[in-house]
Every structure is written in C-alpha cells, then in structure tokens.
Image (cartoon, helix red, strand yellow):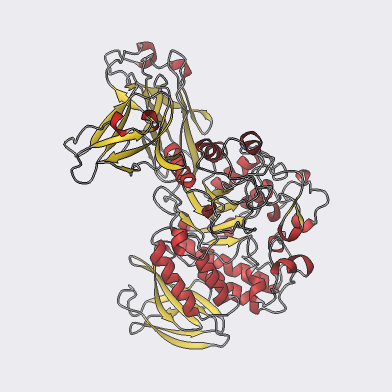
Amino acid sequence: MVRSFRFLALALAGCGAVPLAPADLGPQDAAPPPVRACTTPFAFTPQGQPKSVSLGAEWNKFDPTQTPMTGPDKAGAYHADVALQPGSYGYKIVVDGTWQLDPQNPYSKYVGGVENSVVEVDDCNLPQLQFRALSKSADGALHVEVQYIDGHAAAGLDSGALAVTLDGAPAAMQSVDASGVITVDATGLAHDKHRVTVNAADRAGHAAAQLDIPFWIEDQPFDFRDGLLYFAFTDRFNNGDPSNDSPSSGVDPRANYEGGDFAGIQQKIDAGYFDSLGVRTIWISPPNANPDHSEVGTGGYLYSGYHGYWPVAGRQTQSRFGSIDTLKALVKTAHKHGIRILIDSVLNHVHKENPYYVQHQSEGWFNGDGSCVCGGTNCDWTTHALDCWFTAYLPDLDYRNFDAMTTMIDDAIWWAREVDVDGFRVDAVKHFYPAATRRLRSKLRDTFEHAGPLYYLVGETFDGDRNLINSFIGPNELHAQFDFPIYFDVVNTLASYSSSLRNLEASTASSDQVFGSAPMSPFLGNHDVPRFLTIAAGMLAADPQAQAWTNPPSLPPDDSAYQKLQLALTFVTTSPGVPLVYYGDEFGIPGAADPDNRRFMKWSGYTASEQATLDHTKRLGAARAELNALRRGNRSTLWIDDDLYVYARVAGNDVAIVVINRNWNPRTVSVPVPASIPLASGTVLTDRLGGPPVTVSSAALSLNLAGHSSQVLAP
C-alpha cells in the first residue's frame, strides 16, 4: 500500500517544527502544528515471505534495483521513503521480479501504453489542511475539526490568511489552537445540505489547497435507494424562462431546442411535483455548453445540441438552459426538499469545437483522426469500443493520456464543488478506459466524503451482458449501472407480451446474483429507446427511426397500454436498487425512436388513462417511501407462472409483497408464504395501491385478483 496516495502522497515529520506566535495560536507551551517532510512514503504488505520487494517507476526509469523497499516490519509491511520533485509518477511494485499494480491505490497512469499505479506529489513547502472529525445531529448541531499542517520550512500559520466559512458566510463559532487544530461549531442548522470550507496559508505566503467538507442535516441518513430516480431531460421538461429560448436555425423543431431549462426544473421542484412522486434524486441532462450550430445526426437529419452530449466547454453551462447561477439555484432548491441532483457526465468524447480538441489534438489526447466511426467499415462497435468515434465531429478521448484524464475528471470535480451536485450519470461507460471512472470515484471520495458517503455514480453500459456491466462496478469504480438486461425483459414481458413472466422472474434472479448489493437502477424507458407506452400499444413500426420522422405514433386508442404501463411501473418501482422513471412515463407519453422519444413534457389536460397512471405512480412512490422492505429488502419469489408474478421484499421483520397479474381476466390463487417470510397467520396486509386488504391464513395468501392488476401488500 502507498500511504497518502489519495491526496498528494505527502508525509509528516515531527522534527524541524518551530513554535507559532502566541498572538496567532495561543499558549507557547502547546505542541506546534505538525510539519511536512519532503519524502514520499510507500508501504506494501505482500503475501508470503518474498526475497525482494522494490519499486519500478518513472523516477527510476522503471529500474526496480534503484528503489528497494525495506522490511518486513512487525506487521509484515515493506517500506520506502522516496525524495521526489513535484509531479505525477507511474509506478509498480515488484515482488521477486513480478510487477504488479499497488492493490490499495485506485489511481492509475498509463506509461508507454501500460497501466501503472500513480503517485501525485506537490511542493512540500506548501502547507496542508487535513480533515479530523465531524459530528452533527438532526436538530442542527455541528462540530468540525481540521488540522493545519505546516510546510517543510515550518513558516507557521498566518492567522490573518485563515478563512473558515459555513455555507459561504464566515463561521460564527470558530477557533484555532497552537497545535493548528481548527474547530468549527454551529447550532440550529436547517435540514439541508451544508458545507464548511477552510482556506489557510503560512507566513511565507504559501497557500494550502482549499478543504471542503460538505454534509447533510436530516432526520435519517439518506440512501439513494430511499426513493425514485427521475430523469428530467432538461430541454424537454419545463420552460421556466422563455427569455433564454433560442432554437438553432434550419433545424426541425423535433430535433431542436424547445425551451426547457434549469429554471423550469426548479419551478417543478418548488411546486412539490417530485415530492408527490416519491422522487429523491433527479438526473438532468449534461449542463455543458454545446455548439450553436446544427450537425447531421441520426437518420441524416439535422440536430441541434439540445440533448447536451456535444460538449464544447468543460466548465460552462448551455446558455439556453440557464447560467451557472441558475443551475446553482436549482440545486439549492432541490436540497431544501431533501432531493439529490445528478448531472450527466460526458467523459467519452467532446465536440470538435471544444478547446481540448482544438489545443491538444496533436498531443495524444484523442484516438485517431475520426476515420474510425463506430459501426463503420472496419470499425465495429465491439473491437473498437475504446477508440471509435461516435460520429466524425465527436473526437474520442484516450485516457491513456494522463493529462486528458486528469483534465476531464478535474472538470467533474469542479461541478461537484461549484454547483454542489450529488453525483453523476456517466455516459457510454464501456467506450473508455475504466481508469477514468476509478479516478472520478476516488476523487469525489477523497475531496468531499470526509464524513461518509455523499455521491452516487451510475453508469450507462447499453448492453445485455451482465458480466460486462458488472465489470465497471466496485468499491473504487461506479456504484452501480442501469440494468439493461432487466429492461429488455420488462419490454418483452410487460409491453409486447412476447415472452412469459417466467422470463422476467429469471432475469431478476440473474441480476440479483450478478450485481449483488450494488444499488442498480432498473427502468422501463430512457432517451435512447422507444417509449414503453407505444410498444405496449403495439404501435411501434418495424423501423422506429423512420417512424419518428414520418409517422410519429399517437396516443393509444384504449386503456390497455396504460394498464400495461402501470404493471411495469409497479415492477420497476418495487425492485431493489434505485428505480428510474424517465420523464413522462409516470403518466404515459407515446414516442418512437430518437427524437420522438423526447417529446416535450405534458403538464395539463391529462386523459382519464393518463391521470389514472399518474395517480398509480404517486401511490407507488409513497409506498417506497413508507415501506423499508421496498427500499432495503432482499427479493424472493413466492409464485411465478406465465401471467402471474408474486415476490416478497424482506428486510429483517419488514415485509412487502408485490403482485403483478398481466392476465386480462380476474383470477383467484392461493400463494404459499414460506416460514422464511415473517408474516404470522392473521396478519392483515393493506394494499398500498388501493385494493382490498389480504389476510395471511394457514401460511398462505388468498388473492382475488382483478384482471390486469398489481398490488403492493404490507402490514
């Protein structure tokens, strides 16, 4: 293990410290602040008893004989302290001639096309700020401790340069003692997200890196599984500020900017729309500026960048969506409602107008010259997944280039710090090296998560291979991904009815086994697939892409498609993980392929079927918020046949029973309740969807099911 790799590979030493002036830091007889050393410590604990352990690295031209590690110590670890100039250094640990990555270091760097662990070293004369402790309570009390660490020259803390803020204002109750411990206390903080920020410098004018300590005050610790995840596709959701409307000239309105913006999303948060659905997390489109002109997109039609996936700037918002201040206001409003905000992170590519491409295209930041377009001649999607360009104007980033990777991840961290977002939906995960997502996860943790988990990273790997999807999930990688295999079976079993519910049950078992405790996101629709409602109505053409332009589907002619949608919503929202609702699916929007699956949101004039579906979704959201079993429980099947699926979610003594009957006819069935389900005989279960109660009798549930119906039963 390399200690301190998560920050900047820094070491501390007690020698060389000098007392700080009493006017600044209190009694002279107190221990002075710790002082940095100018060597970088490495430590590694091998398996067994090797004959030699050393470091092969850029600083020694990968000659392991130059940097041996001494040991073992009493704990079996080997050590080396290396004097390094500021910079980044790829390295490997060499054990008896075998080279390996540092198993405790999530950060990596490619050198000569080979992946290495990386240590990043700054100037040892710079002081540091190190998090020590945070305690808080639901009534708004706060206590924070931060350690000031002097630079190697021990110049001492400049008390005049010390700045401690709480939510952007000077912290009212703060102090610093002679040993450099900075203390912040507060009371009466509102239920909201807050941040303590500390800046410091020494008397020689050397500034420490800013330390940000975000935290929440709330009644119960938040978990992303506690509510629904909602994709509010920014441009198509709600127009809150018509003054920023500016469609691109010459583009069909269906593939153009239609006026949705940050202010529109904020208005709906303020109005309680998301609260009414049980939404606890909102995913918004990439906020980055996109080109003002159009480009040729799917089907040869002109498109604008209304979707956000053609970034021309790393740290600038799309003006048609609103300013950075407008986005901050959206996030602040969400936080006051206890809602988290995810922004879409486009890490695979940039647009050709992006300065990163203009300035660095000849420096190895990008793969090829654009002649290898995904799916084109001699450039298939699988073989060239890591180097093909999605289209000729979207240069594909090569994260074997360390500068490219650090720049893109630094931009993501900037959005987390500047806008205070709570995580990212990561686009096109299988198309770039996972070193990037590992760095993103680790940087979020090391920069902000001092007092515990705060962020959620959910990836998009548009594929049916669970093992491939799972390969990007882990303690130092993505938290989870969207469960595409489940999606395919949801469509086949609950929309088109082309396969038995047994297939859906088998699919859930496979996902539960492969993904384990990862908080995956099941879903029934997103912006890249035709709308569930249109599939359920049997109105999707053989060529959905052509249909989107030539014959967009209308509303279904009867209620049956909405009933199918309601069953699918029941399944998705009662599944383990972080269920996703794509905007409009809560009541049913029709649509073929892109761009028809991105119609503008409907806010009034609902038909009876739409209103019934919206009410159904609200009841499901309320059930998930109420029932711990739906949020935390393991899933087990109680009954499965071609048209009936009954499963339990069990968390300790908390139980919820979900019933999905896709048969159009009424049905009566006795469902066994095994001893592993803690429901005693005589227990009355209430249907959170409004149906009649059911009583457990003789270890069974006698269900009298209406045709094409669902239930969520719990004590």
In the orientation shown, which residue stands out farthest toward the left?
Answer: 74
Name the residue: 23% across, 35% down: 78
Furthest residue in direction front, as rendered: 378
Where residue 633 sits in the image (x, y, percent)?
Answer: 39, 65
655 w.r.t. 329: above or below: below
Total of numbered circles in the picture?
0
Asked if residue 591 can be seen in this view, the reply is no
Direction from residue 582 to residue 661 in the image, left or right: left
Percent of width and height locating residue 505: 45, 75
Find residue 159 and report its image quarter. Answer: top left
Which residue is drawn at the image coordinates 55% and 79% (left, top)? 709
Instruction: Find residue 594 and report its horizontal and vertical position in percent.
Output: 69, 61
Query: In the picture, which quadrant includes the N terminus?
Result: top left
- Across and down, in percent, residue 128 comes to 40, 25
The residue shown at (49%, 75%) is 504
Left or right: where 674 falls relative to 639: left
Please tell me in which quadrant of the rendered image residue 450 appears.
top left
Q: Quadrant of the C terminus?
A: bottom left
Could you say which is closer to the camera, residue 57 or residue 72? 57
In front: 438, or 397?
397
